[in-house]
């Protein structure tokens, strides 16, 4: 069977006119992944909404990225990238659980700061939902800061609904805010 890594699943034009390719992650994305990870520590929005991002060296990054690519190959994770002019500008992932929970997965998404608000996050989410359906998932879950109004807006737009609040679920420098659990149900027939 051919590798899923690198497989193109969509293409569209962003609000600034840039052509965006949506595809599965591949090993060659390692340098873009490292660059994005390093930029997150300086990204005030990310620190505010996702918490402090630890700095990692390149060998730790290689180790993590190898595990990501292996998980994607084994069907344990869906990870798509948005590529503009040959550079990865965003990621979305669904980590699929195991055993009696293998019908569900946890979603994460990040778009590089300079590419936000161009419609890329919405299109990446739509693409990952299509892939999750193709793989037979029934539930996609996520947790986000209740202050992250843009992310919440985009998640609602693609069909996620709030299912609960964790009071003080995220604490940064001893300041705690609520987090929201959201869910997207993909298949109602057996639920
Ligand atoms: C959240 C995120 C993934 C969204 O991706 P994006 O590419 O910026 O989103 P899009 O451009 O597709 O859509 C943005 C939408 O939010 C709206 N928006 C922008 N700022 C907003 C705000 N402060 N409050 C509510 N809505 C807002 C825009 O108007 C647009 O809505 P529309 O398409 O209905 O007009 C991206 O901004 C990001 O990576 N943020 C930092 C990391 C993060 O928060 N990740 C999610 C953690 S759970």
Image (cartoon, rainbow, N blue to C red):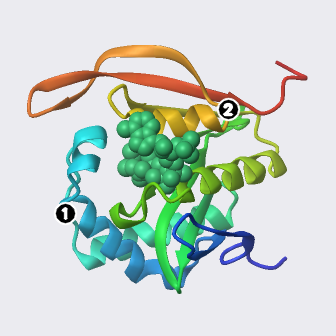
Q: Is residue 171 left or right of residue 118?
A: left
Tell me the residue at 69%/50% (across/down): 126
Tell me the residue at 22%/74% (across/down): 57
Q: In this orientation, which residue lies closer to the viewer: 134 or 3?
A: 134
Q: Is residue 191 left or right of residue 14?
A: right
How would you rate the neighbour count of disc 2 (Cα within 10 Å): few for under 14, some for 14-19, many for 20 or more?
Answer: some
* 92 over 48 or under it: above or below: below
> Image quarter for residue 172?
top left
Q: Which residue is mark 1?
A: 55
The quadrant of the rendering that contains the N terminus is bottom right
Q: In this orientation, which residue lies closer to the viewer: 118 or 29?
A: 118
Residue at mark 1 to residue at mark 2: CA–CA distance = 33 Å
Question: Which numbered circle lies on residue 90?
Answer: none
Q: Which residue is mark 2?
A: 159
Tell me the residue at 19%/23% (across/down): 176
Tell me the residue at 68%/62% (across/down): 74
């Amino acid at each position: 069977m051919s590798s899923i890594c690198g497989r193109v699943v969509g293409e569209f034009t962003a609000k600034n006119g840039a052509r965006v390719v949506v595809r599965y992650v591949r090993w060659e994305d390692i340098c873009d992944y490292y660059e994005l990870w390093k930029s997150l520590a300086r990204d005030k929005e990310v620190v505010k909404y996702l918490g402090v991002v630890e700095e990692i060296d390149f060998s730790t990054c290689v180790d993590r990225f190898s595990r990501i690519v292996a998980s994607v190959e084994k069907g344990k994770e869906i990870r798509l990238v948005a590529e503009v002019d040959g550079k990865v500008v965003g990621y979305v992932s669904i980590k699929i659980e195991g055993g009696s929970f293998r019908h569900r997965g946890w979603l994460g998404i990040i778009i590089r700061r300079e590419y936000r608000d161009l419609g890329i996050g919405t299109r990446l989410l739509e693409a990952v939902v299509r892939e999750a359906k193709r793989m037979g998932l029934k539930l996609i879950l996520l947790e986000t800061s209740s202050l992250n109004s843009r992310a919440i807006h985009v998640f609602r737009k693609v069909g996620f609904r709030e299912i609960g609040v964790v009071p003080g679920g995220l604490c940064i420098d001893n300041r705690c805010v609520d987090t929201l659990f959201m869910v997207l149900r993909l298949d109602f027939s057996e639920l």
